[in-house]
Image: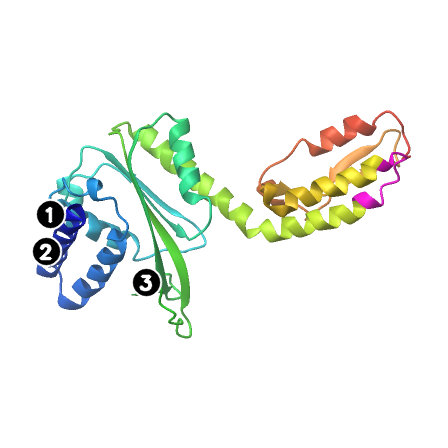
Amino acid sequence: MVINQGKDRLVAQVVALIHERLPADEASSVTEFANQYFTGYACEDIMSREVSDISAAIMGSWAIIQRHDIASPKVRVFNPDYKKHGWQLGRTVIAVLARNTPFITESIRGELNRRNIVIHTLHSTIFSMIRDQQHQLSELLPARSVMKAPEGHQQGEEVLLYVEIGHCTDQAELADITATLNSILSEIFLVVDDYEAMTACAKLAIADAKNLPSKQSAINDDVPEFIQWMIDDHFTFLGYEKLQVDYSGSEPSVSRVEGSALGLLRQRQSLGSTDVYNSIKGPATPE
């Protein structure tokens, strides 16, 4: 309780400083942003910080959310510097703004762990925002607000992820981290957006599997059961493609059905065609 009271006092000091530095209307909006931002924030991550640094970091985060096309993520990797940002920290900061989507935090953490990068702080906050047609922030809604966006505007939930990692001054590495995180987030959107469609395709595959012209009845039973097991929240579908086999030539050929790719396979090629070809290349005609 003492720690929480200390945190509340610190946040109050940050808010007071924001009101000193900004016009009243803007200060009110930034205060709402700060209060939502610090909800659930680990006390030990801010108690040792200077009030001026925290307030500058908040205003920097506020600047990040001002314009954002939620169709694509925004990733910023930088070393806070007094001259450039108005605050300083002996760590590298990663700020990610994206539409609220599953797997974002886990994926960012996984990539940093893969690189053996030490994570000192990781905090995510979900905001409900209204943006105009130019993707400019029109209004930050209170937490749990049920307000609807006016005509010509878009309302949505966006997640702001704040990460502190070990200090890195290698500009090439910082650029590579930025590019990789952007790529990962784009792939997350592909998977999440197509998940229902991939699940629907899996259900259709159950019906197809039951009608397989196999002489082994166990296959006709086991394959549908296995697909249903995957559908029942035991598996995360990352990609899907439909393959077709052409037996008109001297050897069978396998290709992806145009327009069938979903999830990651919208941007990637799989070994599916090769695997199917290798499994059937013996006979030149179907069973």
Identify the residue under disc 1.
Answer: 52
Magenta includes 171?
Answer: no
Q: Residue at x 80, y 43 (%)?
A: 209
| Residue 111 versus residue 206 in the image, above or below | above
Q: Residue at x 11, y 43 (%)?
A: 50
Foreground tag (3 vs 2):
3
Name the quadrant containing residue 251: top right
Side of 210 where 107 appears, left or right = left
Disc 1 to disc 2: CB gap under 8 Å: yes
Residue lying at the far front of the rendered structure: 1
| Residue 81 versus residue 128 in the image, above or below | above
| Residue 272 versus residue 209 in the image, above or below | above
Q: CA distance from mark 3 to mark 2?
A: 23 Å
Identify the residue under disc 2.
Answer: 17
Q: CA distance from mark 1 to mark 2?
A: 8 Å
Name the quadrant containing residue 171: top left
- Give the x, y percent position of residue 48: 14, 39
Name the quadrant containing residue 279: top right
Identify the residue under disc 3.
Answer: 143
Q: Nearer the viewer, residue 71 or 192?
A: 192
Per the rendered image, the range of residues in magenta is 209-217
Amino acid on which the number 3 mark rests in the picture: Ala
Q: Is residue 243 visible?
A: no
Q: Quadrant of the C terminus?
A: top right
Q: Residue at x 39, y 36 (%)?
A: 109
Amino acid on which the number 1 mark rests in the picture: Ser
Residue lying at the far bottom of the rendered structure: 151
Amino acid on which the number 2 mark rests in the picture: Leu
- Looking at marks 3 and 1 on the same chain, the residue that comes earlier in the sequence is marked by 1
| Residue 131 versus residue 167 in the image, above or below | below
- Looking at marks 3 and 2 on the same chain, the residue that comes earlier in the sequence is marked by 2
